[in-house]
Image (spheres, grey):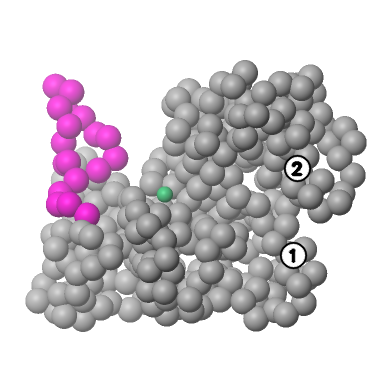
Amino acid sequence: VFDVSKPWLNRVIERLPRAFLTAVSDVSFEVPEKSVYALVGESGSGKSTIGKIVVGLVPPTEGTVEIEGVDLSRETDAAKVDRIRSDVQMIFQDPYASLNPRWRVREIIAEPVKSRGGDTEGLAERLLEQVGLSGADAAKFPHEFSGGQRQRICIARALASNPRVIVCDEPTSALDVSVQAQVLNLMSDLREELGLTYLFISHDLTVVQHMADVIGVLYLGRLVEEAPRDTLFAEPKHPYTQMLFAAAPRTDVFGREVDPPKGEIPDPINPPTGCAFHPRCPLAVERCSRERPEMRSVDGTRVACHRAEEAVRRFHAEKAEDA
Ligand code: SF4
Ligand code: MG
């Protein structure tokens, strides 16, 4: 259970460059064991901030992160917190930046285990094979690998701690399209093999479509919609989610782009009043700028929109027109 249920960021933001973080509030979601939960949003939506909170890189000023039934913000047994922390590993967007260029791959992969005093004999070789590389690669340096191979090394390093949960922040968005699918397939296979749970962070709905069981859509630091993957793809109910689908690359017969995304993303530090999406929303009414919509259930989806039913009607009407 990840429940960051109150505005919390002000204290943290004073201490960190604001480019690193987006204020997150009222974000509450659960990731069942062995499932894949995808958080989707544009840059500035707060998705990376949430990932950092979950792995403990950033403390929430309010709210809780509960992993394996333990509330890490309240647990006082340091050994227990440490063990649970090592159950949660992170894979970052940029495999170039997250590997020490002066270390051999063997040292990179074994480091998290070595620092805990664990046995690292043959560990790197075994993990490299598990991620589709060769044991002999353990003696090489990061610069000797392609982007996709480096991300495999990052995955091997994450697996070294025998994690149960992996937080992946845009794990393939720095890679060539042709390589992306291979890395995603590897991650799917590892999930099956090892019974892993993923929190998968992405700006790209087509990427999460292959991976996710449940998708949460973030806008300016708030969860605006959450639904099982197939439900979300069949019937997005929030006008923002509908806009994300419309913004996915679509071209007409002349190769011209149709339905370009409308409007700029407002400053996440000073989000608009009421529903933060109202300046870009085609369905906005006066109430939307005044009153923040609460999350509510609509046909198996959680959605924060005053006019979700109207948005659904409009979505189907436009689809029928397109057909
Ligand atoms: Fe649009 Fe209003 Fe719904 Fe916000 S609450 S998404 S502005 S209709
Ligand atoms: Mg990010």
The residue at the point 37 percent across, 57 percent down is: 17
**Tag 2 residue:** 111
Question: At which x and y percent is residue 209?
Answer: 46, 44
**What amino acid is found at the position of numbered circle 1 in the picture?**
Asp
Q: Which picture quadrant has residue 306?
A: bottom left
- Vertical order, 264 against 107 (above or below): below
- Of labels 1 and 2, earlier in sequence is 1
The residue at the point 67 percent across, 23 percent down is: 141
Q: What crowding class fits label 1: few (fewer than 14 Cα within 10 Å), some (14-19), or many (20 or more)?
A: few
Determine whether label 1 and label 2 are within 8 Å by CB.
Answer: no
Q: Which picture quadrant has residue 158?
A: top right
The residue at the point 47 percent across, 29 percent down is: 175
Quadrant for the N terminus, please.
bottom right
- Vertical order, 127 against 279 (above or below): above
Left/right placement of residue 90 relative to residue 62 reads: right
Q: Which picture quadrant has residue 254?
A: top left
Q: Secondary structure at mark 1?
A: helix
**What amino acid is found at the position of numbered circle 2 in the picture?**
Glu
Q: Secondary structure at mark 2?
A: helix
Q: Which residues are magenta?
A: 247-265
**Tag 1 residue:** 82
Quadrant for the C terminus, please.
top left
- Secondary structure mostly seen in the magenta stretch: loop
